[in-house]
């Protein structure tokens, strides 16, 4: 075994992982609507949730509340209002967020003074902003999320999704401190540095970054 000298902040990184695990344990679970708006299920999940509600045999919560639907959405689901499409009502409340992941090039034994460190480590190494020329674009993907979900929550979702179980087309490492995440759409791009306690918005020049 060889020790990678870039892992100076491993203790802090382990604390961040434990924070993530605790957050997952505290999650009471999502309603059908929350899952759908976050792109975690399709409309076919409605039948499964309805069957689960019937099996619970609990009178204290209605099926509408259990599914997390508004009165208008529930009426559309029951098709009592043929002029309103249930799927259109839900789809109008979610969007596609495109994002990119940039990570330091460390494959050939290179060391970086701020690798796997927070924003303070970057500044201590003499950089006010992440040096894009030392980064590689490792992933370009998309995420379904609620229209009103803010950048911080979206970044946390990306962090959690690409930390342990990777999709087949993901070629990077687990997202960690010193990584740069880009959120973009047709009108703008925003860049965020992965810090020990969240994300810090930064300036970044993607044209200088390498491509995996």
Image (spheres, rainbow, N blue to C red):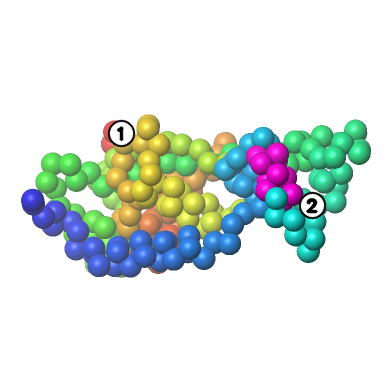
Above or below for 182 versus 82: below
Q: Quadrant of residue 82?
A: top right
Above or below for 93 versus 59: above
Identify the residue at the far left of this view: 1
Where does the image place residue 69, in percent across and percent down from the top left? 77, 50
Q: In which quarter of the image is residue 138?
A: top left
Where does the image place residue 33, in percent across and percent down from the top left? 69, 48
Can residue 8 be found in the magenta stretch?
no
Q: Is residue 209 visible?
A: no
Residue 64 shows which numbered tag? 2
- Residue drawn at x 68%, y 36% is 43
Residue range of the region highlighted in magenta in the rendering: 45-54
The residue that mark 1 highlights is 211
Q: Which of marks 1 and 2 is nearer the N terminus?
A: 2
- Residue drawn at x 43%, y 52% is 160
Would you say 51 lies left or right of 19 here? right
Q: Chief secondary structure of the magenta span?
A: helix
Can residue 48 be found in the magenta stretch?
yes
Label 2 sits on a secondary structure element that is helix
Where does the image place residue 156, in percent across and percent down from the top left? 47, 55
The quarter of the picture where the C terminus appears is top left
Q: Count neighbours of disc 2 (C-alpha within 10 A) and say few if under 14, some if 14 to 19, many if 20 or more.
A: some
Q: Count neighbours of disc 1 (C-alpha within 10 A) and say few if under 14, some if 14 to 19, many if 20 or more.
A: few
Would you say 145 lies left or right of 137 here? right
- Residue drawn at x 91%, y 38% is 81
């Amino acid at each position: 075994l060889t020790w990678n000298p870039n892992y100076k902040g491993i203790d802090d990184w382990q604390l961040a992982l434990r924070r993530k695990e605790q957050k997952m344990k505290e999650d009471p679970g999502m309603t059908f609507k929350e899952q759908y708006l976050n792109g975690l299920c399709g409309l076919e999940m409605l039948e499964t949730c309805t069957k689960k509600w019937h099996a619970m045999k609990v009178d204290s919560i209605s099926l509408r509340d259990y599914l997390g639907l508004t009165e208008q959405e529930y009426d559309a689901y029951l098709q009592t209002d043929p002029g309103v499409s249930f799927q259109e009502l839900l789809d109008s409340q979610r969007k596609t967020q495109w994002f990119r992941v940039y990570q330091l090039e460390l494959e050939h034994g290179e060391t970086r003074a701020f690798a796997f460190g927070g924003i303070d480590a970057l500044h201590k190494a003499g950089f006010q902003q992440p040096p894009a020329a030392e980064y590689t674009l490792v992933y370009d993907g998309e995420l379904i999320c609620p229209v009103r979900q803010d950048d911080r929550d979206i970044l946390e979702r990306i962090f959690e999704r690409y930390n342990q179980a990777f999709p087949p087309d993901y070629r990077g490492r687990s997202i960690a401190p010193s990584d740069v995440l880009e959120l973009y759409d047709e009108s703008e791009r925003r860049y965020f540095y992965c810090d020990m306690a969240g994300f810090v918005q930064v300036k970044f020049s993607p044209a200088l970054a390498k491509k995996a």
